Amino acid sequence: MSLFIVFEGPEGSGKTTQIHLLRDALRARGYSVVCTREPGGTPIGEQIRTLLHDPQNTEMLPITEALLYSASRAQHVAQVIRPALERGQIVVSDRYAASTMAYQGYGHGLELQMLQQITELVTEGLTPDLTIYLDLEVTIGLKRKLKDSQQGQGEWNRMDQLDIAFHRRVREGYLEMARQEPSRWMIVDATQSIQWIHEHILERVESLLQKRSLGVS
Ligand code: TMP
């Protein structure tokens, strides 16, 4: 049964851990799961990721960012996400189009409607069935991510080094998008324990799978 799930959240919110737990739980229930990420997920996308996240690329304009993330997404949808959904698999992606709305739109101030049009073009209208937003106060997340990167786990990228006000606008953007579409979004308190978060997410995903199997959209 195909399902498209996206994880969103600020730096250091624990997305990777939760994605792995969800993947393992779904596989244990017999589902075929594909985990992927943005920017990246394809050879071309990974090259675009390197360009986007190089801390030396400080001259990059917000519109260049938006177009590069979108270019990576076009490859990702065509080469990974759509084929997996067509094979009947569950796709779990670490970030998708909501990141562009949050970071380049709410964060940098690019026009949301223009970003929506670009997104529509590159995704051919493919929207997630569920977006799970791991919510965290921005300074906590940035501190966690900095610590991890200093210990050789994960990267400290060009987006991480933008100011706190930027990251606050990003968080507000996510919360607003989630409030606008509660049936397609789930907000999770990322300060709770790993196990608590996992159980809540799994419950919501299982209920979605059950509705799907009953033919309820
Ligand atoms: P992450 O892989 O550690 O989550 O880092 C991805 C970074 O890229 C994060 O700072 C958010 C940013 N990003 C955007 O600004 N726009 C996008 O469309 C995507 C997919 C990511």
Image: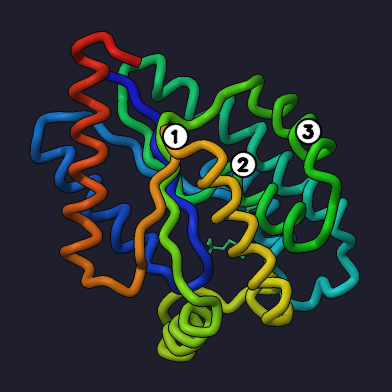
| Residue lying at 52% horizontally and 71% vertically, measured from the top left | 11
Q: CA distance from mark 1 to mark 2?
A: 14 Å
Residue 113 location (% of width, % of height): 81, 36
| Residue lying at 9% horizontally and 40% vertically, measured from the top left | 28
Amino acid type assigned to the residue bearing label 3 in the image? Ile
Disc 3 residue lies near ligand 1 with CB under 8 A:
no
In the rendering, which numbered label is found on residue 118? 3
Q: Which residue is mark 1?
A: 184
Q: Using residue 145 as the reference point, say whether residue 205 is left or right of it.
A: left
Q: Secondary structure at mark 3?
A: helix
Q: Are marks 2 and 3 in contact (CB under 8 Å)?
A: no
Disc 2 residue lies near ligand 1 with CB under 8 A:
yes
Q: Which residue is mark 2?
A: 97
Neighbor class of circle 2 (other Cα within 10 Å; few <14, some 14-19, many 20+) is many
Q: CA distance from mark 2 to mark 3?
A: 10 Å
Residue 205 location (% of width, % of height): 25, 37
- Which dot, 3 or 1, sits closer to the camera? 1
Q: Secondary structure at mark 2?
A: helix
Can see residue 39? no
> On the image, which quarter does residue 61 sit in?
bottom right
Residue 178 location (% of width, % of height): 51, 46
